[in-house]
Amino acid sequence: MFPDGPAPDPAGSHHERRIRSFQPRRSRVTAGQGDALRRLWPQWGLDIDGLRKLDLGELFGDPELPVVLEIGFGMGEATARMAAADPGTGILACDVHTPGQGNLLSLAERAGLANVRVANGDAIILLREMLQPDALAGMRVYFPDPWPKKRHHKRRLIQPEFLALAAARLAPGAVLHCATDWEPYAEQMLEVLDADPHFENVQPEGGFAPRPEFRPLTRFEGQGLDKGHVVHDLLFRRR
């Protein structure tokens, strides 16, 4: 459908088959999203193929620009708002949802945002194979799939193995910011982050953090709040 757009399986057979923390959602790409993918992907998109190291300065056209990785951005509304509010920071937004990729590209073009790039594929391969050590000025993981059934907990992204990889790609002092409205997952996140020697809680007293002003209230989050969900933010700094 998009010859020069995001590939269906960019890493293909180059890397091992393993348990994934995400499940691709199949939904219809609108005409506007498809148009954005066809026109803007060659300029602002990249496939996570695991075959090369990224030069983030080259990718964003500014070697001095600090870059934050956002893992899972949904339809991209919050990403676009954060990029508009902080043009001095690049956002490398990673997801596998094609309609969301197209929507974020469209939002970025409409708002004239030069500090957004969209990555298609597995964030683990991006971190492990394609980013240099200490390359990132921050990392955001907002509302990852909670995998609520006990037998699926091994699929949750925030695990000790992921934190070790994240720490290796975050610059010293960079912040990992997680948010979830699934309380058992929030408690697990806090437990594994507290136990990780690479990170320290930015909250002097420990525990969860108030929602920072720079993280917009998303439509998804608003729906959860309407249902009585409690949203927890966690901000941990790489030592």
Image (cartoon, rainbow, N blue to C red):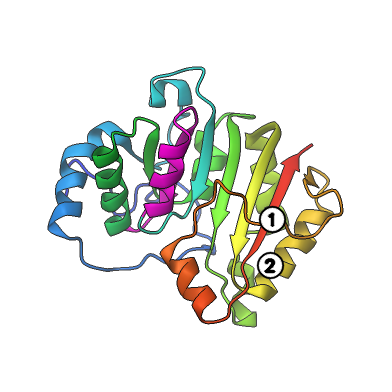
Rendered residue at 37%/50% (across/down): 12
Does any portion of residue 157 appear in the rendered image? no
Tell whether label 2 touches label 1 (CB within 8 Å).
yes
Q: Magenta segment: does it hold 77?
A: yes
Q: Which residue is drawn at 73% across and 67% down?
A: 188
Q: Magenta span has 191?
A: no
Please give the range of residues in magenta.
76-97
Residue bearing mark 2: 186
Q: Quadrant of residue 184?
A: bottom right
State the residue in front, 155 or 51. 155
> What crowding class fits label 1: few (fewer than 14 Cα within 10 Å), some (14-19), or many (20 or more)?
many
Q: In the figure, residue 148 lies in which quadrant?
A: bottom right
198 relative to 46 in the view: left or right:
right
Label for residue 234? 1
Where is residue 72 drawn, in percent x and y?
A: 46, 55
Specify which label sits upstream in the sequence, 1 or 2.
2
Under mark 1, the amino acid is Leu
